[in-house]
Image: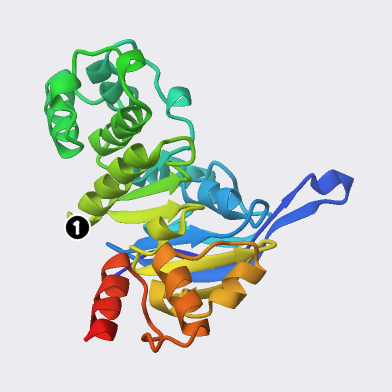
Amino acid sequence: MEIIRAENLTHVYNLVDGGKIALDGLNFSIDEGEFISVIGTNGSGKSTLAKHFNALLLPTNGKIFVTGFDTSDENNLWHVRENVGMVFQNPDNEIVAAVVEDDVAFGCENLGIEPEEIARRVDSALAAVNMTAYRKFSPSKLSGGQKQRIAIAGVLAMRTKIIVFDEPTAMLDPVGRREILDTAQKLNAQGLTIIYITHFMEEAAVADRIFLMENGKILKIGTPREIFSDAAEIKRLGLDVPVAVELAERLRRRGFKLPKNILTDEEFITALKELKN
């Protein structure tokens, strides 16, 4: 079932001074429970798009509907933001309290939820991101990955249907990046719709579909295998491809007969073993 739909979605910054088109007539839909990755170079429009999912920005032209609500209608803002949570790049900018469990409860308190219900939601959210043991900690004592998991718990406690991750691992080390991606996949498996904006192609490769952006447009929508099948096109745009895709392509150029559709490390290793046989 469709949960998000964009119709000619357009966003122009600094309209008074002539304007800079950040989103240029986007049309797409996302189904409930999908895992969508959005990739593109800096300036392609990824983060501008992210802010339209929960009406932090409103369309200059066109429409975007979230759980059936038109985001440009101010009467719908509560419903939109009730259903869409955001996780941003810098976890330190998302922490508002001095104790982990208080930070997770913050959004619920702003929604006016009863204290007993908040306590239940905090327990459930911390368990979902494997941070129950840290509930009494100061966030300042946590790693970057743990702070991001606390930010995710705060979103979960508000019972949103959609979580938008706007480059959530950009400031994390490889361990922290793996923690956040694993958490996003786990939540998606539980039925949440995930929109995951990233510069890391291995992260994008786990999605159901990828939106490939350039200069405010969506150039292509497809499965990871479809998107990364043309490594030359991806590189032309200034992006990397997953390591397995790159290594397989280099070996093919050297004459090794590897399958064309290799995407993951496991598939690459399997193909190498078959070559030996």
Image quarter in which the C terminus is found: bottom left
Front-lying residue, 43 or 144: 144
Question: For the point 61% across and 68% down, which residue is it?
Answer: 235
Q: Horizontal placement of 135 versus 275: left or right?
A: left
Question: For the point 45% across and 23% down, which residue is it?
Answer: 92
- Callout 1: SS: helix
> Farthest residue in the front direction?
276
Question: For the point 25% across and 55% down, which residue is it?
Answer: 188
Measured as percent of width and height from the top left, residue 68 is found at 39, 60
User: Hey, what amino acid is under mark 1?
Assistant: Ala
Question: For the point 36% across and 14% down, which residue is it?
Answer: 140
Front-lying residue, 193 or 189: 189
Measured as percent of width and height from the top left, residue 114 is found at 18, 22
**Residue 167 visible in the picture:** yes
Front-lying residue, 272 or 161: 272
**Residue 71 visible in the picture:** no
Residue for badge 1: 189
Q: Horizontal placement of 16 versus 127: left or right?
A: right
